Each structure stands twice: as structure tokens, then as C-alpha cells.
Amino acid sequence: MSEQPIRIAIVDDHKMLLGALTEWIRSAADDIRMVAAVASWPELLTHPEFPVDVVLLDLDLKDNIPVSLKLSTLKTTGVRTVLMSTYSEPAVVREALAAGALGYLVKSEDAEMIVEAIRAASKGESFISAELDLALNAGEVGGAPKLSAQERRVMALYGAGEPVKAVAFQLGISDETAKSYLKRIREKYRVAGYDVGTKVALRKRAIQDGILLQGD
């Protein structure tokens, strides 16, 4: 864990959701400090705490400012962005990621996954919710699914024979988060046409996909 808390801001024009998200994140992680929760883009830019480390930005803000412009503005100020949306159109997601978003979450994600997305973004890693990844990779059966950096770490440790508790401990995440990563990994492989339901099958796949070395 980094010693300095990750300073985040949330921009969402849905007041109830803004309040719920703020509470969720505050109670879910002590390495994340919420410094701003605002309802509009101008409020973010003029906030005394701006620039922050990571912004959770609602993609559906009704302000007619193109998301690509928001992303490039944040990028030039050194802010990393995770987009949130109520929908998961693959074309929209691809466009957002191409424009520089590091993460993309559907608002129905649980708090643990939102926290993981913030942590990943703060390290410059991308994070896409499992639901979206499945939509993005639909039809690409036969290839290895695209795993996030953290999912690859979980798969490598678990595939190397570590129990879930040890995987969680080594990565500094909760047992529940480690379990939900494994669930996502298995789901991604299932959609790609591979069954990694058992630990042996998952290990074999991790070796085949270069996530785990034969001798590990």
C-alpha cells in the first residue's frame, strides 16, 4: 500500500448516487481519501483540492462536453480517470479507453471493485469491470481473454498453488476481493471458450497463456 492516501474526486450529477458512492468508498478503504464530490465538470475544475490523483467521472453528465475533451484536460493536469456509466455499450467503452480513460465501471459494481479500479488507476493500470470485458470481447472465442494486471497477479499466485487467503495477503486485498477476482477470471475464460473451473485447469491455462512459468 502507498503511504500517501490516494486523493480522489467523484463527478456525478445524480445526487443520491454521489452520496452513496462517497459513503461506500469511505467505509471500504482507508488508503483512499475522498477530497471532492461534485455534480458538474466546472465544479471539479474549480475545486480548491483540484488536481487530485484519480477522478471517478460519470460518463452520462448532461453537459454536452465531449468525454474525450474531459479526458485530455484531466490527462494534461496529471489526473487519472476512471469512467462510470449506467450502460455498457462496447463501442462507447472502446472510445473512452482509446481517449485515455484508465478504467470503466458500470454503476452496479460493488464497492470493492470500485476501490480496486481507483487503486489500479493510481498506479497507471487499466481496470475494466468483468461485465464490460465480456461485452468487449464477445465473439472473440478461442483467444486468451484480456486480464487486468491485478487479475494476472491473482491468477499467477493462485495457479502457483497459493490458497485464496495467501493470495489476498500478498496483494494487500481482502479475501472477498481475491475471490471475486477469481470469479471474474473464470468468467472471462468461460466466455473465451475455456473451462478453468478447477485449480488444476486454471494453473494449466496460466502456464499456456504465459502468466505462470512452468517451474513456478
Image (tube, helix red, strand yellow):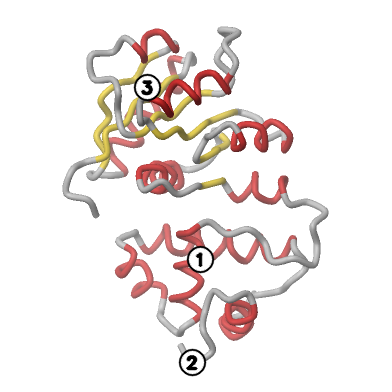
User: In this rendering, which labeled residue sits more in front, label 2 or label 3?
Assistant: 2
Location of the N terminus (image quadrant): bottom left
Determine which quarter of the picture holds residue 205. bottom right
Q: Amino acid at mark 1?
A: Arg
Location of the C terminus (image quadrant): bottom left
Specify which label sits upstream in the sequence, 3 or 1: 3
What is the x, y in percent for residue 100? Answer: 53, 34
Q: Which mark is residue 152?
A: 1
State whether residue 110 is above or below residue 166: above
Most foreground residue, 49 or 110: 49
Q: Which mark is residue 19?
A: 3
What is the x, y in percent for residue 40? Answer: 44, 11
Q: Is residue 7 left or right of residue 82?
A: left
Specify which label sits upstream in the sequence, 1 or 2: 1
The residue at the point 48 percent across, 92 percent down is: 215
Specify which label sits upstream in the sequence, 2 or 3: 3
What is the x, y in percent for residue 167? Answer: 38, 71
Seen as rendered, the residue at the extreme bottom is: 215
The residue at the point 35 percent across, 35 percent down is: 24
Determine which quarter of the picture holds residue 140. bottom right
Q: Amino acid at mark 3?
A: Gly
Q: Which mark is residue 215?
A: 2
Give yes or no for contact between labels 1 and 2 (Cβ–Cβ under 8 Å): no
Determine which quarter of the picture holds residue 89. top right
Seen as rendered, the residue at the extreme left is: 3
User: Could you tell me which secondary element the residue under label 1 belongs to?
Assistant: helix
User: In this rendering, which labeled residue sits more in front, label 3 or label 1?
Assistant: 1
Q: Amino acid at mark 2?
A: Gly
Q: Is residue 95 left or right of residue 58?
A: right
What is the x, y in percent for residue 212? Answer: 52, 79
Give yes or no for contact between labels 3 and 1 (Cβ–Cβ under 8 Å): no
User: Could you tell me which secondary element the residue under label 3 belongs to?
Assistant: helix
